Image (cartoon, grey):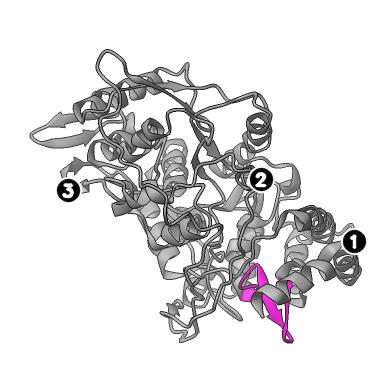
Amino acid sequence: MKRLFSMLLILVLISSALVGCGSSNEKATEPTAEPATVNAPDSNAVTPEVSGIGTVDAPIHVTFLCKDVVPSEENVQSLVAEIEKGMALEGNYIELEVLEAPAGKYADVVPIAFRTGQITPDIIYFQGGDLPIAQEEMLVDLTAYIENSKNVKSIMEMHQIEKVKNYPYLLWLAPARVQIPVMRSDWFNQLESGKALLENPTSDQYYALFKEIKDKGIAEYPVTTDGGIAKLDSVFNHAFGITSTIMNVDGKFVYAKATESEKNKLAFYAKLYKEGLLDKEYVTKQWDTMEQAFYEGKAAFVAGTAGDVVNVYNNKMIQTNGDSTELIVLPPAQGISQAYQSIDVTKESRGFAINADSTVKDAAWAVLDFMAGTEGRKLDKLGLKDVHYTESNGKYVLTDKFPEWWAKFWPTMNGLDTSVVAGDVLTKPAIDSLTAADQYYYGDINVVLPNDLLPLKDGMDKLYTEYSTDIIRGVKSVDSFDEFVEKWNAAGGDEIGVYLQEQLK
């Protein structure tokens, strides 16, 4: 029988203020999700005791599938050997096999392949598409494993704790996934509008920055992104009053995508596009071509995930263009509110799950928990000894190969003792991005929809993508947004709206 999901009710509480930049005294308050559950685990369930896995002569075979972790790569093979050796020292004997992902876009093909039985990994990383799989009871409820964990529980952050309470099937130990705007510091320092932006980062001041970049010929186009507007939204949503996925407009709960605030934001993006400030080819850009344009200097401004991604951007920028091109982290635009993208705690959008049909669930969890421990964190964040770091006088000395390494399990810095590391695990811009993400954190308001409403929402989102893209590119006028809202409501907005009122009344 399919798992029935209880719905998340998010209550908005007034909590710590988010301080704006410069002389401004405006503050944005953070709505915090009250603990809630999605199909709360059975209180009578036995808590797993994960210890003494396998034997020296009979290690437990565990299969692992993760995006961009390729079994044929030498570094991956070495990592697997180190994991097996490290776990054996703790009395857990496993044989870890990294699987090859099916061909195609990972986020699309993996959920399909898993549901149809084409792939049956014990540990599987999802980047979307997991909700219907969890609803069909194909994933393990991780609540008891986490509660009884040796390492995982101790390095979890509040947003992860809340997400697991609401959706206990995915775990992702990483900073809140926030897109942070960055640009080359040498270019930024050339701009007269730069200082004004830091003092008062309104959308108008961002426009002035982009226009100066264009007028001075610093870059071909000031702003680029990777096929959609999510990265731009992280900078500008709050300034236009789009503070959550679902908003209360005149006493009625509606999706922000169909509000006047959204219309005003799209009009701003359309202005950027028309004046050549937004990459004319942004719709066809993928993440790699977006990054290439940034490193090559065709684009001046991009947004990347706080922490590791900003770290990669900074390292590659310096490798390509020299030390003077170290990145600078920029604040979110200030207006009706000021924050980066609102963080949804209804569920993880990505992360590791354990196959409910796995016959080695405890061993699979033991792998995930080991990678959250002291030795696992060192392996995951520092890489391989004598490749990405060396040991000298009780210190881990990072090598010139270290910037090529990235965490294959948990991107979090939690649990890593940086006091014994000689070198920067994260560069200054990466640390600045994490600090900014914390400073401008804002909780989202959202609801997990039941199965029968999901197809309606999918259709509505496709309609939004069509209209928003055409409005930005000038194919449709901004006035066509009103037509979009009518179609949005007819496609399911009205029907889902009734459900939202029931859940958030």
Mark 1 or mark 3, whichever is nearer to me: 3
Name the element at disc 3: helix
Query: What residue did someone put label 3 on?
Result: 419
> Where, quadrant-wise, is the N terminus in this rendering?
top right
Reading the image, the residue beneath label 1 is 476
Residue 478 in sight from this viewpoint: no
Q: Which residue is mark 2?
A: 1
Disc 2 vs disc 1: Cβ atoms closer than 8 Å? no
Q: Earlier in the sequence, mark 2 or mark 1?
A: 2
Q: Residue 87: which quarter of the image?
A: top left
- Provide residue 336's location: percent of width, then percent of height: 61, 81
Mark 3–mark 2 contact, CB under 8 Å? no
Q: In the picture, which quadrant includes the C terminus? A: bottom right
What range is drawn magenta here?
Answer: 239-255
Residue type marked 3 = Ser
Amino acid on which disc 1 is placed: Lys
Q: Secondary structure at mark 2?
A: loop
Dot 1 and dot 3 residues touching (CB under 8 Å): no
Whether the magenta-drawn stretch holds residue 246 is answered as yes
